[in-house]
């Protein structure tokens, strides 16, 4: 069927509820909207599902969630009764329909005879990862769209190690989903039936307490730090409010001030719009409060509390944002220095970073005798390395990070963890404050030792069918005809991550180009959003020269990309 026929099917079949039909009736004169909703099915990839909320095959709704869950249930069932007994942990965030989607998933799983451990209220994504491991579950689901705008939601699947599924499991789920021809074939128990059959279990405080204790146990220092450091924290109306504040309080950080307008859950994110702490606009309210109470640092976590961003007070009283690369470098320096001083660093230690994360953290790690390994983007791949090393014993995983403000320390959580990262950032700021330094002073010392590393990462957003096609053309054309030099500096190496002959990571649609001065840039389409991402990095002996090289790189690469229609 074409998209119009599928639209008519949804509009007229008795299976679909009246609310869905009314929504579809409201767009009957808008062919472009009908096409966007029905020209394809929302794809289940290694990141699960993510899309705009609404009726349609290319939207997030209970029908699409039920089908994805049925696919997961069938895969789990293939592992036998023990896997079904171990069951699935489900968490959800503050977004519209998150609790409904979580309930739908739970009831479908229970209909398939699979135990479900459903959090009684919204919880941060890293706690879901922790709970999967702690409860010895077979799988996990978190209903979230992370930092996307308010009209998005998503469905991420985890496996027994506590990390997001990789392609082997994702492909099996996709195969099962493709075999489901009618939504009416998907059955689900009522909540009460699931409880009566002993399949649906609600979890909450006990797991919360265990998770918080595990975070606190990852403290690097508790002495020689100034816990009077003044911190402004914003959860951006998301799930971080309770766990982040609790951890900081129980660690003795008593000067923590929460942005009141962004303290409580709000699925519309009215004070921020785009709840992405990578965007400096997300700090507007934090800066205002920071100046009022003279805060040393401002910390923000995204709605599902797996990503963290920080701003630091400068000598002029204004606040400067740190990038994910800078924050990662500071954490690596702080953690490794402390662990070596305390002589509690393991043998064969390793740090894992993504292929589009800069090299400063790797240089710091190397100085401490710690190896750095690269993975594909996403914490399913970064923590996939932790899973691998747990089996092979080749290395001991210490820290993983990527440029998009995701960090994980230790292995009790197998995903990026902004609860833990908030604690570590507060601790690092307190350590340097005890030395009459700020995090910016610490970063400057790193630059003096390792060179001035700069970055300029941006995205070209291209929505809809035409946008998707243009992104494909951009990657295809640039792959065939890339720039040979930038600002007179020659490109000396190209890595095509579709070419398995020269790389030691799984195949992915990404390109990376090294210049002869050590600078590099990379291109890749986003796996979860309608955009193509450009990552640019430069280094030199001065901040000014680094900025100039980045400016030339941005201008020349963008000119080439925009020339591809």
Image (cartoon, helix red, strand yellow):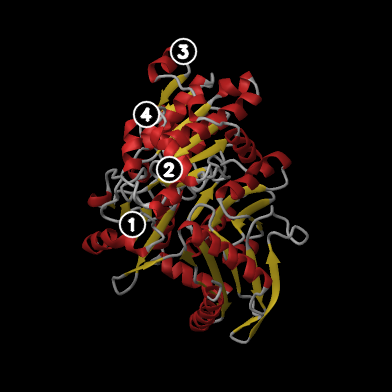
Instruction: Say above or below: 131 vs 52.
Output: above
> Based on the displayed image, in which of its 4 quarters is residue 391 positioned?
top right
Q: Marks 4/3: CA distance?
A: 19 Å
Frontmost of labels 2 and 4 is 2
The residue pinned by badge 2 equals 144
> Residue 120: which quarter of the image?
top left
Circle 1 or circle 3, nearest the eye: 3
How far apart, in angstroms, are the residues tagged by discs 1 and 2?
32 Å
Q: How far apart are labels 1 and 4 at the CA level?
A: 34 Å
Residue 388 placement (x, y as % from top left): 68, 43
Label 4: state its secondary structure.
loop
Q: Position of residue 446 (x, y in %)?
A: 52, 70
How far apart marks 3 and 2 lie (CA) works out to: 28 Å
Is tag 2's residue or tag 4's residue first in the polypeptide sequence?
Answer: 4
Residue 390 % position (x, y): 67, 40
Q: Secondary structure at mark 3?
A: loop
Q: Quadrant of residue 319?
A: bottom left
Report which residue position mark 3 lands on. Answer: 197
Tell me, for residue 229, which label it has, or none.
1
């Amino acid at each position: 069927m074409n998209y119009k026929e599928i639209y008519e099917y949804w509009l007229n079949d008795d299976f679909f509820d009246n609310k869905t039909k009314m929504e579809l009736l409201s767009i009957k004169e808008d062919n472009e909207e009908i096409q966007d909703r029905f020209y394809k099915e929302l794809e289940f990839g290694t990141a699960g599902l993510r899309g705009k909320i609404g009726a349609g095959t290319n939207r997030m709704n209970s029908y699409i969630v039920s089908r994805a869950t049925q696919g997961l249930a069938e895969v789990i069932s293939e592992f036998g009764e023990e896997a079904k007994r171990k069951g699935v942990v489900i968490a959800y965030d503050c977004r519209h329909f998150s609790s409904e989607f979580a309930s739908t998933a739970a009831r479908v799983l229970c209909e398939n005879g699979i135990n479900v451990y459903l959090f009684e209220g919204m919880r941060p994504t890293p706690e879901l990862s922790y709970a999967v491991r702690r409860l010895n579950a077979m799988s996990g689901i978190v209903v979230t769209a992370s930092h996307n705008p308010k009209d998005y939601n998503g469905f991420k699947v985890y496996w027994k190690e506590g990390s997001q599924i990789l392609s082997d499991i994702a492909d099996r789920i996709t195969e099962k989903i493709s075999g489901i021809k009618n939504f009416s074939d998907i059955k689900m128990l009522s909540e009460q039936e699931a409880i009566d059959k002993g399949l649906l279990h609600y979890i909450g405080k006990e797991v919360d307490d265990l998770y918080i204790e595990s975070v606190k146990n990852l403290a690097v220092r508790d002495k020689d730090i100034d816990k009077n450091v003044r911190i402004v924290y914003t959860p951006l109306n998301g799930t971080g409010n309770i766990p982040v504040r609790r951890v900081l309080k129980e660690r003795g950080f008593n000067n923590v001030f929460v942005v009141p307008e962004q303290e409580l859950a709000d699925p519309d994110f009215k004070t921020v719009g785009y709840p992405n702490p990578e965007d400096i606009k997300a700090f507007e309210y934090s800066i205002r409060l920071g100046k009022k109470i003279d805060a040393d640092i401002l910390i923000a976590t995204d709605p599902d509390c797996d990503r963290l961003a920080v701003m630091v007070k400068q000598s002029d009283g204004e606040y400067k944002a740190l990038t994910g690369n800078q924050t990662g470098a500071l954490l690596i320096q702080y953690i490794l220095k402390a662990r070596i001083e305390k002589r509690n660093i393991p043998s064969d230690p390793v740090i894992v970073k993504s292929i589009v994360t800069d090299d400063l953290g790797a240089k710091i790690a190397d100085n401490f005798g710690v190896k750095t390994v690269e993975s594909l983007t996403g914490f399913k791949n970064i923590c996939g390395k932790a899973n691998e090393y747990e089996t092979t014993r080749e290395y001991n995983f210490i820290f993983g990070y990527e440029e998009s403000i995701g960090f994980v320390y230790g292995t009790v959580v197998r995903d990026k963890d902004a609860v833990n990262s908030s604690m570590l950032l507060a601790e690092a700021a307190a350590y340097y404050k005890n030395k009459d330094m700020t995090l910016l002073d610490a970063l400057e010392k790193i630059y003096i030792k390792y060179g001035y590393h700069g970055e300029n990462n941006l995205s070209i957003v291209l929505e809809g069918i035409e946008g998707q096609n243009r992104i494909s053309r951009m990657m295809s054309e640039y792959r065939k005809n890339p720039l040979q030099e930038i600002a007179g500096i020659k490109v000396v190496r190209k890595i095509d991550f579709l070419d398995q002959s020269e790389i030691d990571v799984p195949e992915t649609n990404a390109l990376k180009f090294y210049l002869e001065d050590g600078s590099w840039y990379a291109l890749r389409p986003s796996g979860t959003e309608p955009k193509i991402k450009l990552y640019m990095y430069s280094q030199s002996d001065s901040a000014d020269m680094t900025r100039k090289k980045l400016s030339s790189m941005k201008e020349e690469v963008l000119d080439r990309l925009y020339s591809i229609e």
